[in-house]
Image (tube, helix red, strand yellow):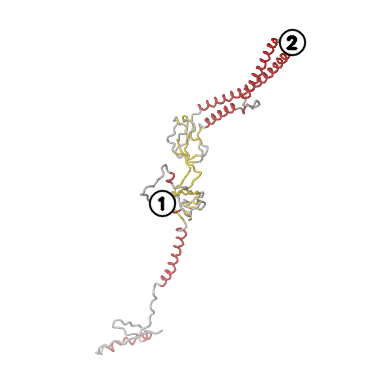
Amino acid sequence: MNARVTEPKPGEATVVTMPRAEKAAPAEKSAPQAEAPSQQPAQPAAPQATAPVEAPKKKGGGRRLILMIVVPLVLVVGGGYFWLTGGRYQDTDNAYVQQSKVSLSADIAGRITAVNVTENQTVKAGDVLFTIDPQPYQIALDQANAALASARVNVEQLKVAYTTAQTAVKSAEAALAIRQAAFDRQNALVQQGVNANSALDDTKLALQQAQAALDQANQQVAASTAALAGNPSIKTEDHPAVQAAQAAVEVAERNLAKTTVAAPADGIVANVSSLNVGQFVATGTTIASLVETGGIWIEANFKETQLTDIRAGQPADVTVDAFPGVLHGTVESLGAATGSEFSLIPAQNATGNWVKVVQRLPVASSCPTRRRTCCSRPA
């Protein structure tokens, strides 16, 4: 190491005491006495050598090294995050949680006798919601059962009539055979000249009457066969009249069963404030609603410019404002048209002042696991 010594300016010199000077300390005590008589002007002190002092290291070298490492790392992480989340996914806030809603109504008309649910009550499938007065429908069922029994009796009577008609046919056939034999004998005698032609008139009339009786008996058999649906050996329960009466009984039984209105599925009952005991309800009138809790899906309305790479079957991540976390689902289907096409009066922009507006199409996504919406979609 080279040491360079420069002459210090007045007032800037620094005296460094060396070990050698410490040994000469006693001699310095007498120095003032020796210098006292001297009147010579003070001479500037001779320059003294100073020990080399190491300059402090510059601060900031470590900071520069940290910046050189952190800045590229931040750029790499930021670029990776943008590639993973920005360019590979499509998202929208225009998404809604959908559930099946069932309008509860009575299949029959009647007066409400009991209400078993309250507003926003959770029910299971088969739980009784309300009851309609069953007495009129019980009477109708009794009448239908009586009509069914009467139809069965009528069928049995038709079978008896058919048997009677068959017996009449056999009797008429026997009478006809007798009349035919008598006519043949009289005719032979007339041909032989024993009897006159007038002797054939009575036997011929009797033969014609026997033939008419046989024809009438055959008609009775045909009528009885037709009354038995063309099958004389038909079973009573298979007869159309009995089947019609049986159908009437089933309708009456159904109406009686419909006096008790039950929940068609698991869900939450809503809009039951107007359902009161004593209220008369008409057939098909909506009186409450049931929001099903079994099936939930997300309907996200993406812009048409976002649908290029969205396909059914792709995974979807859903976030719901009301709940923390993420729901993982699957894209089930894409809408066939925009919402405006399914409106009551679709827009027709055929005028010259038409302005291009980005359309939105619904994308349905199921969320079988609990974590959040199909507003995110890998492109």
Side (left or right) of 207 relative to 41: right
Task: Give the spatial CA distance, label 1 vs label 2.
Answer: 117 Å
Residue 242 position in % (x across, y down):
59, 26
| Numbered-mark total | 2
The local crowd at label 2, few if under 14, some if 14 to 19, many if 20 or more residues have their Cα within 10 Å, is few
Closer to the camera, 18 or 313?
Answer: 313
Q: Quadrant of the N terminus?
A: bottom left
Side (left or right) of 157 relative to 375: right
Point out which mark residue 156 bears.
Answer: none
Closer to the camera, 328 or 351?
Answer: 351
Identified by mark 2, the residue type is: Gly
The local crowd at label 1, few if under 14, some if 14 to 19, many if 20 or more residues have their Cα within 10 Å, is few
**Residue that mark 2 sits on:** 193
Q: Earlier in the sequence, mark 1 or mark 2?
A: 2
Residue 261 position in % (x across, y down):
50, 34
Cβ–Cβ under 8 Å for marks 1 and 2: no
Identified by mark 1, the residue type is: Val
Please tell me whether mark 2 sits on a helix, a strand or a loop: loop
Residue 155 position in % (x across, y down):
61, 24
**Residue that mark 1 sits on:** 358
> Closer to the camera: disc 1 or disc 2?
2
Side (left or right) of 284 relative to 50: right
Q: For the point 45% across and 63% down, which residue is it? A: 79
Please tell me whether mark 1 sits on a helix, a strand or a loop: loop
Side (left or right) of 221 relative to 275: right
Looking at the rendering, which quadrant does residue 191 occupy? top right
Vertical placement of residue 270 versus 253, above or below: below
Vertical placement of residue 80 versus 256, above or below: below
Vertical placement of residue 58 versus 193, above or below: below
Residue 293 position in % (x across, y down):
49, 43
Closer to the camera, 18 or 303?
Answer: 303
